[in-house]
Image (cartoon, helix red, strand yellow):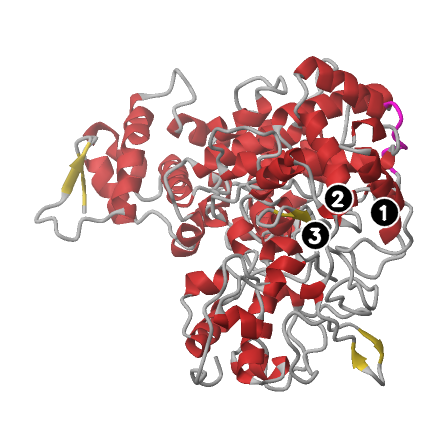
């Protein structure tokens, strides 16, 4: 923060379920301020800014959160509850907005996914009218955060469908005009009651000003008990209707299933119209699908009204679309397969731009069973030849970001790599091909958690640029061997889960710490002195002794940094004047890979892990040198 923010003379307590934009409107009304003045004073925007960005609805970052809490006397938890932040683990579009490809920490980005209402908001007139308390009589009830989610179509408290438009001007409520991505409409307008419509149809006359809290409700605004039950489940990320507890990832996956199926339904409408809760709701969805203009959650786009993966305009149309999707998802498995087969038999080609992110969301975030059933039917509907070489995708997207890129070693452990290579039929053992695959997987693990390019991920790991040019080795990873298909995305998710379960090791710090490390001659001499019969191998001028020293040094460095021994400082640049300082045979002997290797190599092989461990964790409090395998190490 550039300057301390003064506490406001009066504030308000947030109402249950209230969103940030509604809280600002109520507090500005109480203080008789224009919203723009309050936004600046509360630190939500700079002093020279003319509007607050809509991404403030996603979460409040560190400086904005501190300033907002200081001025409003609100706790950080209460302040963040006004944003989408608490929903990041359960509602997929929120995760897309806050996580994307950035990695471990949520952050508001300039991305506005479909199925998030960012250009307008639905509303319940009864909620806006307030509960009759003195404070709500003066400043109105809450604009609720749930209304900003495109999957919300009903008010649970008043058992009514939400309204979408102002009854006076006919425009979507609180509509952000043009290309603006602002938090609220007309923040410079003179103080209005929070429940008044702020839409401007005539610049000379100013905001509409109609009281949205007085909109008349009719019998048609009453959803059935089944729809209210569905709405309750959707708000808890449980479209399948399970009563058991769900972990956040399972809820996220199931909500993705619902939204992917909604895209299939839109693309084939009115094929599934008979599954709508009522004919009137089916008609509402038909009207929404044929409605010109972008969906509420999409910005200015020439294809906005044509995308099947987006939300629809009205609450009633949304209720029909999601109710049909939920009914299909809750069918028994045999019935689900039959219905999916019927739908997929009628869908347009997979490369149609109107699918938007449907297939990406399916592969990345859907539950395993649903993804398997849909992909299997898609393969039957659109058969394709099995290629023998398919390039690995540029980005392997993951949703669980529970590991840090610092925890990825440049030399990926073989048991990690086998999580992917074994199901694809690769034989165990060492080979140049498997070494290249392990390099590639290490780079992809870093790429998936940071979003950086593959080349940048290789640079982060310390992989030489010349090695990065050989990505052809990774082509077998997607579809290969005996005509069997493999779900690379599922295997990669399994790999990331395994990585997240490992003890935390900061390999990035180790690579930096030991960037120039080589084995001291004095340490090697002490090691050799405990094997008297072979001292001559490390004597000055002994070529074989020099090769052993360099090889042992390279393998110790490899253990210290989690990198390939070929990158050890002792071997750089490699080769030296056309003659390598160490050959692979020496390394193989020291690694214990030759069953006939000599006793001295066995001795060094056994000493290596203890010596590396002592370097990593020196015992500064030890009164005497450590003895490992008979070797005195100072």
* 231 or 443, nearer to the observer: 231
Residue 507's tag is: none
Marks 3 and 2 sit apart, C-alpha to C-alpha, by: 11 Å
- Check disc 3 and report the residue beneath it: 162
Which element is circle 3 on? loop
Residue 32 visible in the snapshot: yes
Q: Residue 623, percent across and down?
A: 8, 49
N-term mark: 3 or 1: 3
Q: Residue 147, percent across and down?
A: 65, 55
N-term mark: 3 or 2: 3
| Residue at 46% from the left image edge and 46% from the top image edge | 568
* 548 or 614, nearer to the observer: 614
* 632 or 290, nearer to the observer: 290
Residue 385 is drawn in which quadrant? top right
Q: Is residue 415 magenta?
A: no
Marks 3 and 1 sit apart, C-alpha to C-alpha, by: 15 Å
Q: Residue 423, percent across and down?
A: 59, 19
| Residue at 58% from the left image edge and 17% from the top image edge | 427
Residue 288's tag is: 1
- Check disc 2 and report the residue beneath it: 318
Give the magenta-colored segment's residue range: 345-351
| Label 2: few (<14), some (14–19) or many (≥20) C-alpha neighbours in 10 Å | many
C-beta proximity under 8 Å, tags 1 and 2: yes
Residue 121 is drawn in which quadrant? bottom right
| Residue at 38% from the left image edge and 52% from the top image edge | 517
Q: Main secondary structure of the magenta part?
A: loop
For discs 3 and 2, the disc positioned in front in the rendered view:
3
Q: Residue 461, percent across and down?
A: 53, 48
| Residue at 69% from the left image edge and 53% from the top image edge | 116
């Amino acid at each position: 923060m550039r300057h301390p923010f003064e506490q406001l003379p009066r504030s308000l307590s947030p109402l249950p379920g209230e969103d940030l934009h509604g809280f600002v409107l109520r507090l500005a009304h109480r203080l008789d301020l224009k919203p723009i003045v309050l936004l600046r004073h509360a630190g939500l925007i700079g002093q020279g800014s003319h509007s607050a960005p809509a991404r403030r609805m996603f979460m409040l970052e560190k400086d904005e959160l501190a300033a907002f809490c200081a001025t409003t006397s609100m706790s950080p938890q209460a302040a963040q509850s006004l944003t989408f932040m608490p929903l990041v683990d359960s509602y997929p579009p929120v995760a897309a907005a806050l996580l994307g490809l950035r990695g471990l920490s949520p952050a508001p980005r300039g991305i506005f996914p479909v199925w998030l209402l960012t250009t307008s908001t639905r509303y319940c007139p009864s909620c806006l009218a307030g509960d009759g308390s003195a404070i709500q009589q003066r400043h109105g009830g809450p604009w609720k955060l749930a209304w900003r989610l495109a999957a919300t179509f009903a008010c649970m408290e008043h058992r009514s469908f939400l309204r979408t438009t102002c009854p006076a001007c006919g425009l979507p409520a609180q509509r952000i005009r043009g290309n603006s991505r602002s938090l609220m409409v007309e923040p410079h307008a003179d103080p209005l009651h929070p429940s008044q419509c702020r839409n401007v149809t005539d610049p000379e006359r100013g905001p509409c000003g109609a009281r949205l809290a007085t909109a008349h409700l009719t019998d048609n605004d009453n959803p059935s008990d089944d729809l209210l039950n569905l709405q309750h489940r959707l708000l808890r990320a449980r479209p399948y209707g399970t009563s058991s507890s769900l972990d956040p990832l399972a809820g996220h996956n199931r909500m993705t299933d619902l939204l992917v199926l909604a895209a299939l339904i839109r693309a084939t409408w009115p094929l599934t119209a008979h599954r709508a809760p009522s004919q009137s709701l089916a008609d509402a969805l038909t009207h929404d699908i044929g409605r010109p203009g972008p969906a509420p959650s999409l910005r200015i786009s020439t294809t906005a009204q044509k995308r099947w993966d987006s939300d629809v305009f009205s609450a009633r149309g949304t209720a029909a679309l999601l109710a049909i999707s939920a009914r299909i998802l809750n069918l028994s498995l045999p019935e689900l397969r039959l219905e999916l087969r019927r739908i997929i038999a009628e869908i347009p080609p997979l490369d149609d731009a109107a699918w938007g992110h449907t297939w990406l969301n399916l592969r990345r975030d859907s539950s395993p069973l649903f993804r398997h059933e849909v992909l299997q039917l898609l393969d039957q509907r659109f058969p394709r030849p099995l290629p023998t070489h398919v390039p690995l995708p540029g980005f392997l997207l993951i949703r669980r970001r529970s590991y840090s890129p610092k925890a990825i070693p440049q030399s990926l452990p073989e048991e990690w790599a086998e999580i992917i290579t074994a199901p694809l039929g690769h034989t165990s053992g060492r080979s140049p091909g498997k070494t290249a695959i392990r390099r590639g997987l290490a780079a992809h693990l870093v790429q998936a958690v940071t979003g950086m390019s593959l080349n940048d991920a290789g640079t982060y790991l310390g992989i030489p640029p010349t090695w990065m040019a050989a990505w052809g080795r990774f082509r077998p990873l997607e579809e290969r061997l005996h005509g069997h298909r493999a779900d690379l995305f599922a295997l990669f998710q399994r790999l990331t889960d395994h990585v997240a379960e490992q003890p935390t090791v900061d390999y990035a710090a180790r690579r930096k710490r030991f960037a120039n490390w080589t084995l001291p001659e004095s340490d090697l001499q002490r090691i050799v002195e405990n094997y008297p019969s072979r001292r001559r191998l490390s004597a000055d001028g002994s070529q074989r002794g020099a090769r052993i020293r360099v090889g042992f040094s390279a393998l110790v460095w490899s253990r210290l940094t989690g990198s390939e021994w070929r990158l050890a400082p002792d071997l750089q640049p490699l080769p030296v004047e056309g003659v390598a300082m160490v050959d692979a045979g020496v390394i193989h002997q020291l690694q214990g890979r030759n069953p006939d290797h000599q006793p001295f190599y066995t001795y060094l092989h056994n000493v290596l892990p203890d010596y590396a461990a002592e370097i990593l964790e020196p015992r500064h409090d030890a009164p005497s040198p450590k003895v490992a395998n008979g070797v005195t190490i100072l």
